[in-house]
Image (cartoon, grey):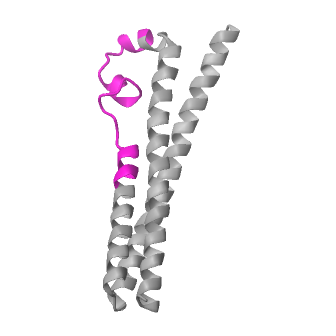
Amino acid sequence: MSAAGGGLTTAHAEVKAEIARTDTKTALLLAFVGAVLAAAWTVARDLPLNVPAYVAGSLGLALLVAAVALLLRSVRPNLRGGHGFPLWATLTPEEIPAVLSGDLAADVAGLSRLALAKFTCLRRAIDLTCAGGALLILALMLALGGAA
């Protein structure tokens, strides 16, 4: 194996590992946001909410729902993509060796674009989660302390 081929194989494995790490982080954040949404709903039912608390809480919940949408978009299967299962499912047994001996650099580039798209969605979802959480905390303070 040439040095360039070894480097491509390493890059390919690294990109696939980054996709797996991003998907794991996405799953954990999705579970966290779901728990925050459930907790916020439970707390909001038991508190007397004034108008400012209601507005801040509603905006916070809306941001958390938007974060969930981004997270789900990040892990949504891309069935039209050229990588992985969908590609193999469309090939005959005779075509698979030819595809495997193809250009690994193109596969690394495609997977890198996929990883970047997943990472971008995850990053935006984290930002929305932080903003939504801050608004929920503000709503709680307004509900407990009252609007001055």
Q: Is residue 43 above or below residue 101?
A: below
Residue at image coords 37%, 90%:
47
Q: Quadrant of residue 66?
A: bottom left
Q: Residue furthest front?
A: 148
Residue at image coords 49%, 21%:
109
Residue 90 relative to residue 67: left or right: left
Residue 18 place in picture, x, y as percent:
56, 37
Q: Does residue 80 belong to the magenta stretch?
A: yes
Residue 134 place in picture, x, y as percent:
48, 70
Quarter of the image containing the N terminus?
top right
Magenta part of the chain: 69-98
Q: Residue furthest right?
A: 3
Residue 94 place in picture, x, y as percent:
36, 10
Q: Does residue 142 belong to the magenta stretch?
A: no
Q: Is residue 82 above or below residue 17?
A: above
Q: Is residue 82 above or below residue 65?
A: above
Residue at image coords 48%, 46%:
23
Residue 57 relative to residue 27: left or right: left
Quarter of the image containing the C terminus?
bottom left
Residue at image coords 34%, 92%:
48
Residue 111 place in picture, x, y as percent:
48, 27
Q: Nearer the viewer, residue 11 or 130?
A: 130
